[in-house]
Image (cartoon, rainbow, N blue to C red):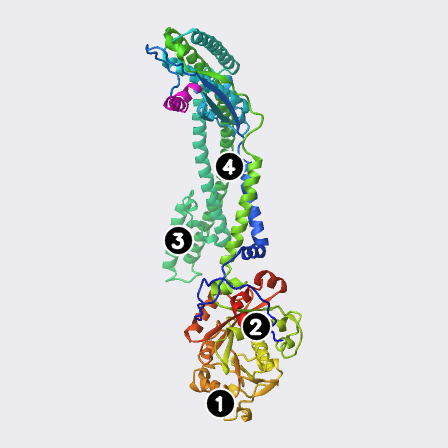
């Protein structure tokens, strides 16, 4: 039974989605299935998983660091409107439509009501609301203002009812309850003032509130007076102004002293450097050249040098006048050097004094800063108490005015709202919500994991699976050759003709069957075997494919057309003197009997299998490949052989394969797993198509048994399932 008869029976393929590159419009091309995406996720597990964990944990940590917020809710009930049973019109403000309800909700959201709530807060209320902020307040910073302390208020109407809830979010649970209840009370107060009437409830409310505000105002004023006496702060503003002016003056003097010290330090550094490198040029420094008597001595020295130059034209060095001038020059030079040393000494003394002056200014500035900070700390409490006293006083005066302005009116009896449930402090914050954070992190982690894995699959353009060949490149997958790491290199090229039973030999036989199925040409014919880059196993596949056809009774010629780096003779342990290059150099005549031509040197390596070597190496094999005689030679060999298998150089390295392809009938492309790029393979297959060759398909080489199981899933059989029916 042949290898073709042993292939499994599978279901018919789906309709084609993409036309093949070699014109077979009936080719089946599958799209990625869920299994393909599972393989992608599994392949990139250890890249995508750390990224997903990092993103999820970072987001979770960020959300967990949110400021805890508490929520409290108070409820108000609107009076149910009474039905009018008489013709007499009754004017009231009860809720009778959706418009009325929406109006009250907008009033609750208005800035006016927010201002009323802020004005109603007592000093103790403000301290309560400021309490959660003080823990994280920077030294010297002021606490948030009253407007910032109000938090977020959300009114909601309960469907099919006369109830409205007031929900307040705040950092403090007691503060949230306080504000929710205060919004209710101020809303009732606003409605009472808007209606303009007065009843016993309103009068009692205003009187009670006026008494409370009077007590609060007196208590606030008493605290302010006690604080003044304790810290002697009658002239606090003047003291702070004096300290501020003192700080500015000291800072100006300190800046001047620091600049003088830095300038002197730089000058000393310049002098010390010149002393080390070129002491003779010290007079070029402006400070030294202008110091003391140095200007006059320099002038005197210049005059002496001038006279010496004049006398040197008349007298020799030992002349009395010349000796006298030399002595005078030495004396002046010595005086200049002593003045230079004195200037440097004075400069160092001045530098030390500047350092002491700067240090004293720094010490005085620090003392002034402490005084300023102390007064600042006192001013915070003082102004807070002063503001509290003023606010309490204003509130008390305002409530008295309101009480005096209230008049009795029946409309007051129709105030449509009353408090129902007071807000209570929440037991725990509603944010951050650990449960929602965990759900968010898990969902985000899964999304990032899938996005990174699938994204990398699009960025990684190397061939990894049957889908890359059938779906992206658009070519038939003829078969998958497993990784033959356990097979010695000397045996890999003769697995088929050695009759060994192994996964490798069975894989080559399956490729042989696929080639027979995909081929549209009858024998004799020539098949080119090429690849994208070196090291993809095209020579091994050429040898075993040729052996497979020879094993099935075809007379096969295996040609080594890789003339730059011939390898076939090594695998069959032969020399490389005879072959294509030797035949071409001998005149390139087509022999009637090629088996007797010594320059060609056909070698029978197995039953029905012959080898034609390259016959040497060539750096420019295109001289042979472009000639017409090369094509004539291949056509002539078809008279003696059923099949010619040409092993060629990789297309990504040189252009020899394109020239060889023009002389052949069919092309078999070899691709090694995770080695060549899909875009390159598609480009080279397009070039082969332009040379009018029939592309049999691609052989995927170098997959481990585990990858064959996960990547191929034997889907390459599906593209030619219909042929099994015709062969069986």
* Residue annotated with mark 4: 355
Sequence-first disc among 1 and 3: 3
* Residue 418 x, y percent position in the rendering: 46, 15
Side of 551 relative to 582 (left or right): right
Q: Is residue 131 magenta?
A: no
Sequence-first disc among 4 and 2: 4
Sequence-first disc among 4 and 3: 3
Sequence-first disc among 1 and 2: 1
Q: CA distance from mark 1 to mark 4?
A: 94 Å
Sequence-first disc among 1 and 4: 4
Magenta-tinted stretch: 97-117
Mark 4 Cα-neighbour bin, 10 Å: few <14, some 14–19, many ≥20? some
* Residue annotated with mark 1: 585
Q: Quadrant of the C terminus?
A: bottom right
Q: CA distance from mark 1 to mark 2?
A: 49 Å
* Residue annotated with mark 2: 728
């Amino acid at each position: 039974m042949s290898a073709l008869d042993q292939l499994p029976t599978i279901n018919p393929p789906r309709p084609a989605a993409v036309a093949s590159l070699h014109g077979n419009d009936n080719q089946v091309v599958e799209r990625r299935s869920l299994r393909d995406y599972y393989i992608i996720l599994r392949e990139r597990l250890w890249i995508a998983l750390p990224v997903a964990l990092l993103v999820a944990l970072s987001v979770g940590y960020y959300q967990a660091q949110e400021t805890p917020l508490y929520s409290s809710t108070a409820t108000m009930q609107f009076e149910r409107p009474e039905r009018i049973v008489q013709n007499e019109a009754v004017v009231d403000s009860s809720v009778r439509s959706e418009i009325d309800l929406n109006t009250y909700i907008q009033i609750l959201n208005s800035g006016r009501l927010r201002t009323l709530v802020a004005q109603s807060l007592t000093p103790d209320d403000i301290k309560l609301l400021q309490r959660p902020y003080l823990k994280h307040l920077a030294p010297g910073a002021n606490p948030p203002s009253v407007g910032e302390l109000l938090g977020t208020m959300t009114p909601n109407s309960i469907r099919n009812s006369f109830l409205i809830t007031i929900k307040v979010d705040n950092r403090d649970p007691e503060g949230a309850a306080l504000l929710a209840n205060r919004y209710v009370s101020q809303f009732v107060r606003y409605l009472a003032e808007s209606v303009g009437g007065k009843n016993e409830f309103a009068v009692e409310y205003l009187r009670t509130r006026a008494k409370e505000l009077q007590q609060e105002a007196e208590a606030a004023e008493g605290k302010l007076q006690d604080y003044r006496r304790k810290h002697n702060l009658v002239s606090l503003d003047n003291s702070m102004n004096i300290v501020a002016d003192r700080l500015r003056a000291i800072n100006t003097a300190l800046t001047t002293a620091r600049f003088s010290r830095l300038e002197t330090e730089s000058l000393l550094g310049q002098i010390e450097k010149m002393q080390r490198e070129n002491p003779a040029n010290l007079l070029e420094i402006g400070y030294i050249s202008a110091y003391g008597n140095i200007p006059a001595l320099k002038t005197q020295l210049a005059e002496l040098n001038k006279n010496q130059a004049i006398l040197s034209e008349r007298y020799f060095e030992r002349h009395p006048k010349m000796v006298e001038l030399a002595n005078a020059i030495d004396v002046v030079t010595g005086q200049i050097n002593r003045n230079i040393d004195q200037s440097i000494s004075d400069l160092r003394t001045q530098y030390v004094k500047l350092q002491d002056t700067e240090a004293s200014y720094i010490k005085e500035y620090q003392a002034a800063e402490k005084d300023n900070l102390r007064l600042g700390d006192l001013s915070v409490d003082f102004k807070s108490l002063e503001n509290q006293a003023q606010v309490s006083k204003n509130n008390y005066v305002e409530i008295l005015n309101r009480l005096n302005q209230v008049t009795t009116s029946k409309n007051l009896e129709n105030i449509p709202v009353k408090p129902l449930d007071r807000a209570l402090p929440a037991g725990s914050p509603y944010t951050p919500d650990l449960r929602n954070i965990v759900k968010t992190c898990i969902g985000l982690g899964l999304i990032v994991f899938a996005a990174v894995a699938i994204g990398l699959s699009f960025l990684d353009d190397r061939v990894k699976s049957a889908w890359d060949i059938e779906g992206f490149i658009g070519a038939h997958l003829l078969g998958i050759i497993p990784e033959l790491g356990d097979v010695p290199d000397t045996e890999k090229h003769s697995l088929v003709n050695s009759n060994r039973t192994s996964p490798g030999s069975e894989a080559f036989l399956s490729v042989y069957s696929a080639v027979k199925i995909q081929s549209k040409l009858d024998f004799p014919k020539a098949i080119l075997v090429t690849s994208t880059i070196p090291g993809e196993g095209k020579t091994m596949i050429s040898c075993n494919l040729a052996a497979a056809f020879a094993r099935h009774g075809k007379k096969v010629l295996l040609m080594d057309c890789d003339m730059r780096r011939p390898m076939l003779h090594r695998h069959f342990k032969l020399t490389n003197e005879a072959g294509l290059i030797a035949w071409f150099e001998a005149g390139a005549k087509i022999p009637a009997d090629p088996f007797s031509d010594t320059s060609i040197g056909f070698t029978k390596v197995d039953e029905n299998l012959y080898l034609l070597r390259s016959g040497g190496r060539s750096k420019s094999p295109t001289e042979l490949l472009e000639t017409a005689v090369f094509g004539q030679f291949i056509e002539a060999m078809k008279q003696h052989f059923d099949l010619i298998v040409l092993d060629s150089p990789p297309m990504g390295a040189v252009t020899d394969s394109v020239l060889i392809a023009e002389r052949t009938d069919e092309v078999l492309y070899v691709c090694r797993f995770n080695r060549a790029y899909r875009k390159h393979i598609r480009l080279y297959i397009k070039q082969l198509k332009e040379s009018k060759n029939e592309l049999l398909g691609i052989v995927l080489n170098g997959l481990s048994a585990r990858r064959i199981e996960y990547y191929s899933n034997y889907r390459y059989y599906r593209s030619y399932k219909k042929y099994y029916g015709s062969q069986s």
